[in-house]
Amino acid sequence: MKVLIVFTHPNPNSFNHALLESIAAGLEESGHEVRIKDLYQENFNPILSANDLTVLHTGKIPKNIAKEQEQLLWADGLVFIYPLWWFDRPAMLKGWFDIVLTNGLAFEYSSEGVKGLLKHKKALVIITAGGSEDYFKDNDALQLIHRPVTDGTLSFCGIKDVSHQIYYDISNLSDNERTAILEKTKETGINF
Ligand SMILES: Cc1cc2nc3c(=O)[nH]c(=O)nc-3n(C[C@H](O)[C@H](O)[C@H](O)COP(=O)(O)O)c2cc1C
């Protein structure tokens, strides 16, 4: 499988980056072809500009957007790794979705309603959170963690085969717990 990992964390020494290394190692061990899109490292511009939006409305695709879409269309499998920021994905990743998932490429409207066009892809979403699992449970917020990406974005675009791994309380994890998570993540890559 061709797998695109979209990684969103500004710090190359973060736990998120360790998760990236683990999943990539697992995927490669299984023979998948892996490409990594590190949004901060490539200094990705997440702003869907007024000009780009105007061009999109004429049915044309601006060059910068076409480049991103080629990378998306290359992949059969998508892996997203990011920290939960304000109950959602970081703005950098949100901007990538704004730019890459355009009407006509990722979805279309028909007389039967909206149709997702990326239905042959599968996805894995790996999220880290500062809050504890109990905090999210007590605030009836567990679903909020993955719904914006899984339902609001991927499923809308036809990607129904989505799995997630959510890791809580990141700053309070022991070294052993971190190691266990990284091993599990490599295993997930092997079995993707
Ligand atoms: C801007 C910002 C917003 C955050 N919002 C949340 C949040 O809504 N819920 C939460 O549990 N943690 C939140 N956090 C904590 C991060 O999720 C946590 O620091 C991260 O998952 C730890 O991973 P890392 O060690 O790889 O950075 C936030 C952190 C930042 C910097």
Image: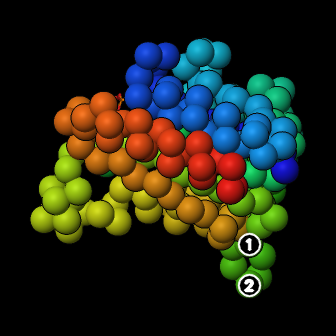
Q: Quadrant of the C terminus?
A: bottom right
Q: Is mark 1 within 8 Å of ligand 1?
A: no
Work out whether 126 lies above or below 120: above
Residue 79 rendering spot, x and y as whole percentages: 63, 46
Q: Residue at x 19, y 65 (%)?
A: 137
What is the three-letter code of the residue carrying label 2? Glu
Q: Quadrant of residue 41?
A: top right
- The residue at 36%/48% (across/down) is 167
Please provide percent x and percent y for residue 151: 52, 65
Left or right: 186 in relation to 55 = left
- Nearer to me, 19 or 80: 19
Between 23 and 44, the residue placed more toward the observer is: 23
Of residues 113 and 189, the one nearer the viewer is 189
Residue 61 percent location from the top left of the image: 83, 37
Please give the label number shown on residue 42: none
Q: Which type of secondary structure does the marked residue at label 2 adopt? A: loop
Coloring basis for residues: rainbow
Can you tell which quarter of the image residue 130 is in? top left
**Picture coordinates of residue 162 (x, y %)?**
60, 63
Q: Is residue 86 visible?
A: no
Residue 138's place in the image compared with 16, above or below, is below
Identify the residue position indicated by label 1 in the image. Answer: 115
Disc 2 packing (10 Å; few <14; some 14–19; many ≥20)? few
Judged left or right of residue 60, residue 187 is left
Q: Residues within 10 Å of mark 1 (few under 14, many from 20)?
A: some
**Residue that label 2 marks:** 112
CB of mark 1 within 8 Å of CB of mark 2? yes
